[in-house]
């Protein structure tokens, strides 16, 4: 696990903050597979310092993205109480935007569900909140009953994966619109 920020000496806190700043830029530029050696070098610390703060790549990723994953999960919970017909699409747009911001995160999110790490826990919360939203929309009749909640999240991750190399909001929105239209009940699925 990562070292809690409030237990660090001032110099260690500065190193940790610099590592996070550099890692954030590297992950957004090069994706979550950016090398940890380069991150440590750019932060002007040794690789041992990086590993003291973040024992694994997943710990570093979790520290950077877990709070935002929690925000996206909280949005799903909030939207589950809304009566608008576009709540699922609004949430999926937010999920895709978040995932595209870190190239390679889609694969990491799928792989981390169920892991006993902070990142895995954040991904699990995201999936749980998304599943509640999908089930709520199924009860309202706006999502087909043969759709599994994980299918919907996998669709969003797939769209993020396809559009991550050349993020184009209009393309991801178009692909989401097509997907959401396919999730809606039709006469064929009702009978």
Image: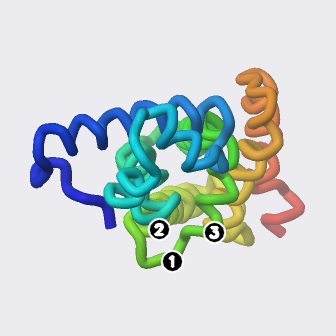
User: Does dot 2 land on a helix, a strand or a loop?
Assistant: helix
- Residue closest to the eye, 83 or 177: 177
- Residue closest to the eye, 160 or 107: 107
* Residue carrying label 3: 111
Residue at image point 64% right, 44% down: 34
Question: Is 6 rendered above or below residue 168?
Answer: below
- Residue closest to the eye, 88 or 66: 66
Q: Residues within 10 Å of mark 1 (few under 14, many from 20)?
A: few
* Lower position in the chain sequence, tag 1 or tag 2: 1
User: Does dot 1 land on a helix, a strand or a loop?
Assistant: loop
Q: Quick one: quadrant of the N terminus?
A: bottom left
| Residue 118, picture quadrant | bottom left
User: Does dot 3 land on a helix, a strand or a loop?
Assistant: helix
Q: Can residue 128 be seen in this view?
A: no
Question: Mark 2 and mark 1 in contact (Cβ < 8 Å)?
Answer: yes
What is the CA distance from the residue labelled 1 to the residue labelled 2?
Answer: 6 Å
Instruction: Tell me if 35 is positioned left or right of 62 in this view.
Output: right
Instruction: Tell me if 149 is positioned left or right of 12 in this view.
Output: right
Question: Is 81 rendered above or below residue 188?
Answer: above
Residue 114: give its label.
1
Residue at image point 56% right, 59% down: 134
Instruction: Tell me if 19 is positioned left or right of 96 in this view.
Output: left
* Residue carrying label 2: 120
Residue at image point 75% right, 36% down: 164
């Amino acid at each position: 696990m990562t070292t809690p920020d409030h237990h660090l000496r001032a110099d260690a806190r500065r190193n940790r903050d610099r590592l996070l700043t550099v890692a954030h830029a590297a992950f957004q530029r090069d994706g979550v597979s950016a090398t940890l050696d380069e991150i440590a070098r750019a932060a002007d610390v040794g690789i041992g310092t990086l590993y003291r703060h973040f024992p694994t790549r997943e710990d570093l990723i979790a520290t950077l993205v877990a709070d935002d994953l929690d925000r996206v999960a909280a949005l799903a919970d909030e939207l589950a109480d809304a009566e608008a017909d576009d709540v699922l699409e609004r949430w999926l747009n937010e999920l895709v935007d978040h995932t595209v911001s870190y190239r390679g995160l889609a694969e990491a999110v799928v792989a981390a569900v169920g892991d006993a790490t902070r990142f895995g826990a954040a991904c699990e919360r995201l999936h749980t909140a998304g599943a509640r939203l999908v089930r709520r929309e199924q009860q309202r009749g706006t999502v087909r009953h043969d759709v599994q909640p994980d299918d919907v999240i996998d669709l969003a991750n797939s769209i993020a994966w396809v559009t991550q190399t050349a993020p184009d909001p209009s393309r991801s929105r178009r692909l989401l619109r097509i997907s959401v239209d396919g999730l809606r009940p039709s006469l064929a699925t009702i009978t």
